[in-house]
Image: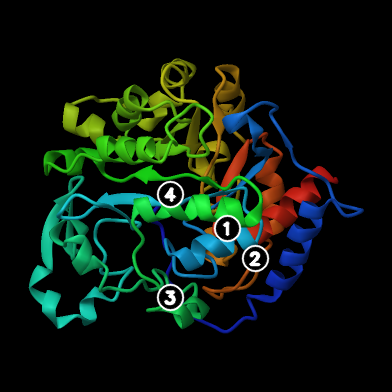
């Protein structure tokens, strides 16, 4: 999903202090202990069966483990996430789908320490942006499996570097198998929320994503309307293509209001995200998708000083045409929070994230992506018990 990261001086802050309490809180809610509230679903099957607000583990539990690893995914479930974003899908040279935040893997794997791959480092134009590094489409799956995942934003998450090198890059097929295994082991249906990354770019390379996703979903019997797999993309045409291939719940991701989806850029469509979030644009999206995943700033814009402004009408407008909203991304660290919820200046320090969650929940959103599922569950419990 989003690629934002913050820079700053790293300081030890005891940032894990919330974790133990959060695990207890999540467990209490799951067990229905006194003093806890159960999140209600919309009522129904499939997407409507999920608790509201839904807590979605963003790339797993990426606040505590390197993102898009089975260590991150499993911890998200341990912490109580309702859905796990497993994963951001990009292809290999030989056509396999793997889970990486971006096709450029210099910042999320140890590829730079592999001399045998030094000559793979190159510069490409990715969605109009010149990008230098190592790209999944230049590696076979067997080659990628020799690499190990590392923490993407160590300045904000120095503790996560403890786990650098521990896990391989998962494939989407392995994720689907893992989903079934975890569902059996935990005695509850595990949901996942994969994303097609840069689909126009990869289609241009002869590595189209949507057909590969659909083939694997059909193979594992997960291509139905009530299947526990929600598909998402920043490119509306990717979602439209998926809508013709499978019956899964579909979500259009929305970046800043002045941005243009890259498929629009490639097709010469002048519309921006601001056009897509008008009542007319939302009605169009509702014709082929069940939800939207806007940035939190589209729900509550930030003022010039970084504090929160007045909520927009996006939640009401989307609900009016039957769309659910799963905004992104809540993170515990100060640099990612609205200014009034920050505490101190440490880049890895936690702010008043529970207060920020409460403010966003009050807008009526149906769920939220978070790097810290345990914190999200505590915040939901507080909100429902208010």
On the rendered structure, is 36 left or right of 346? right
Q: CA distance from mark 2 to mark 1?
A: 7 Å
On the rendered structure, is 328 left or right of 204? right
SS of the residue at dot 1? loop
Q: Nearer the viewer, residue 170 or 306?
A: 170
Q: Which label's residue is closer to the chain start, 2 or 1? A: 1
Residue 296 image point, x, y percent: 53, 44
Residue at image point 43% right, 26% down: 247
- CB-based contact (under 8 Å), mark 2 and mark 1: yes
Quarter of the figure that contains the C terminus: top right
> Would residue 340 be seen by someone viewing this image from the given angle?
no
Q: Which label's residue is closer to the chain start, 3 or 2? A: 3
Q: CA distance from mark 3 to mark 2?
A: 18 Å
Q: Nearer the viewer, residue 267 or 381?
A: 381
Residue at image point 48% right, 30% down: 249
**Marker disc for residue 28:** none
Q: Which residue is mark 4?
A: 176
Crowd around label 4: few <14 · some 14–19 · many ≥20 (10 Å): some
**Marker disc for residue 154:** 3
**Marker disc for residue 337:** 1
Q: Which residue is mark 2?
A: 351
């Amino acid at each position: 999903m989003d690629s934002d990261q913050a820079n700053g001086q790293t300081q030890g802050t005891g940032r894990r202090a919330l974790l133990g309490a959060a695990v207890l809180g999540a467990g209490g809610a799951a067990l229905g202990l006194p003093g806890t509230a159960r999140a209600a679903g919309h009522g129904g099957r499939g997407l409507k069966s999920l608790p509201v607000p839904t807590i979605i583990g963003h790339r797993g539990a990426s606040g505590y483990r390197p993102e898009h690893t089975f260590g991150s995914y499993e911890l998200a479930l341990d912490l109580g996430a309702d859905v796990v974003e497993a994963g951001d899908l990009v292809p290999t040279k030989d056509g396999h789908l793997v889970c990486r935040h971006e096709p450029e893997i210099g910042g999320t794997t140890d590829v730079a320490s592999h001399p045998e791959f030094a000559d793979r480092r190159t510069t490409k134009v990715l969605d109009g942006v010149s990008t230098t590094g190592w790209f999944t489409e230049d590696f076979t799956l067997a080659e990628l499996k020799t690499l190990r995942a590392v923490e993407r934003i160590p300045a904000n998450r120095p503790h996560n570097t403890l786990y650098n090198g521990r896990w391989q890059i998962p494939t989407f097929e392995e994720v689907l198998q893992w989903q079934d295994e975890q569902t059996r082991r935990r005695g509850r249906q595990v949901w996942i929320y994969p994303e097609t990354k840069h689909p126009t770019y990869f289609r241009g390379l002869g590595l189209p994503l949507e057909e590969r996703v659909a083939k694997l979903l059909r193979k594992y019997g997960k291509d139905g309307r009530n299947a526990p797999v929600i598909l998402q993309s920043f490119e509306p045409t990717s979602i439209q293509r998926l809508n013709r291939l499978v019956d899964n719940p579909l979500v259009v991701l929305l970046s800043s209001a002045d941005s243009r989806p890259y498929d629009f850029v490639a097709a010469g469509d002048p519309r921006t995200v601001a056009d897509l979030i008008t009542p007319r644009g939302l009605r169009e999206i509702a014709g082929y998708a069940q939800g939207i995943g806007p940035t939190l700033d589209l729900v509550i814009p930030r003022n010039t000083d970084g504090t929160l402004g007045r909520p927009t009408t996006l939640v009401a407008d989307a609900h009016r045409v039957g769309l659910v909203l799963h905004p992104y991304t809540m993170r515990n660290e100060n640099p990612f929070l609205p200014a009034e919820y920050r505490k101190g200046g440490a880049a890895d320090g936690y702010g008043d994230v529970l207060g920020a969650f409460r403010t966003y929940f009050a807008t009526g959103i149906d769920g939220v992506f978070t790097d810290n599922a345990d914190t999200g569950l505590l915040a939901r419990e507080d909100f429902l018990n208010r």
